Amino acid sequence: MSESERRTTQGVEYENVGEEYLEQRQLQKGAAGWVLLAGLGVAYVISGEISGWQFGLAEGGWGGLLIATILTAVMYTAMVYSLAELSAALPVAGAGYGFARRAMGVWGGFLTGTAIVIEVAIAPAAIATFIGGYVESLIGFGGPLVYLLFYAVFVGMLLYGTGEALRIMFVITAAAVVAIVVFVVGMVPHFDSANLFDIAPKDAAGASSFLTSGYLGIWAAFPYAIWFFLGIEGLPLAAEETRDPARDMPRGLIVAMFALLAFAALILIFAPGGGGSATIQASDAPLTDAIASPKAYGGKNVLFAFVNVVGIAGLIASFYSLIYAYSRQIFALSRAGYLPRWLSITSRRHVPWVALVVPGVIGFLLSLSGITGGALLVLISVFGATISYVLMMLSHIILRYTEPELERPYKTPGGVLTSGVALVLGVASVIAGFLVDPRVLIGTAIVYAIMIAYFAFYSRHHLVAQAPEEEFEAIERAEAELR
């Protein structure tokens, strides 16, 4: 490649690519309006209401999980308002990577993007184990064949096309919402506040029936409280496939967030309040186990069957949408050259098929691993997510000060104070992840180390100049030469 086709700036090298390169990496434009986006935002997360959050009961008791959930709700609400501004101002498929790239350069963009990849690639594997748990609860059979079936079917559906996938996702999510409403209505007659506090207190500072593991239990419950909301931050990944990102993205994010706040509150109160915290604290199928608990219906019934069957839709919705999310994040990083470029090749239907299939195979293998299990996969996914939260909120603050003239169709209420609150709570969440289980830090560090080595020794010398997230670098360089 000639010197005219390469340039070096700030320790990285850019290559100019031909039109054919970008033609092979085109997403479907205008596939979603704000209603579908709001549905996608709920879909990302709704499995967190079906399963995953209950492990926080074992760590902190109902009181510890309640406090952790309130704090994480504040963090996510502040973060969503901040992301609404960033996604309207910078509507690119790279989303968090694109925001951090703009604010903190290539290393900031790379570290943010890879943290998001860890989050959204691991999360479907965790959800697959929960789907297996609900299927086994229903028919007495789960495990590897169930995981394989769901990966094959839903990766296949996303390979068919984006618009079609988002509409199917919306229908599945609506069914999951119905299941949650029916579950809550069915548990109301059996609600007893004593059921919330039926886990025996441990020998810890500040331990009580409210805080069964004491004050540290609040912190330990953080990663599981995050599971109530984890994934909503992935909505900006759909920016390049949205009709009007400046208008639709903020509206979709905010509507989805407030719906999730309501669902989290209802589940946290009525699942343990009806079936007992002790009953569901280690369950892979907490809603159905709450129904069958002696404190509720005392066995399987019509409600049990309905919530089991339709509740699986909630797990499917998040499983399906997070597969979509990892494909778009990997697509953006690969298109720009941060990850191997072949991962961003799209099909004739403008679907990044390689970025769908390869992580899907890895996720399936993770779901099979006996040493990981659903709870640990949740923690690893959350750990990757919280790292990205810190970096994205830092990006919001930096851009407010370094680029005050950047066109912002939507502005975050409270400005940097709002993103600052999310930043502080994000740092606390990162620490909480490896406080619960050191394997989280070790596992994530290994994955990060491999990715960083690839970037440091190879890909930073082969970035793509024409990638949307990188083009502003060339624009700024040209403007600097004119000054």
Image (cartoon, rainbow, N blue to C red):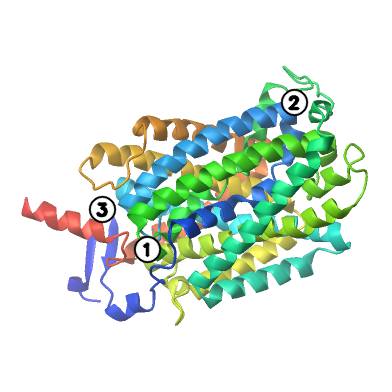
Q: Amino acid at mark 3?
A: Gln
SS label for mark 2:
loop
Q: Amino acid at mark 2?
A: Ser
The Cα–Cα distance between marks 1 and 2, rounded to whole angstroms, is 48 Å
Q: Return the disc, 1 or 2, that comes first in the chain's sequence.
A: 2
SS label for mark 1:
loop
Mark 2, residue position: 213
**Residue depicted at 63% across the width and 44% down the height:** 227
The Cα–Cα distance between marks 2 and 3, rounded to whole angstroms, is 49 Å
Q: Amino acid at mark 1?
A: Arg
Q: Determine whether, in the image, residue 241 is placed left or right of residue 190.
A: left
Q: Which numbered disc covers residue 10?
A: 3
Residue 51 visible in rendering:
no
SS label for mark 3:
loop
Q: Determine whether, in the image, residue 391 is placed left or right of residue 138.
A: left
**Residue depicted at 29% across the width and 48% down the height:** 409
> Which of the 4 image quadrants contains residue 281?
top right
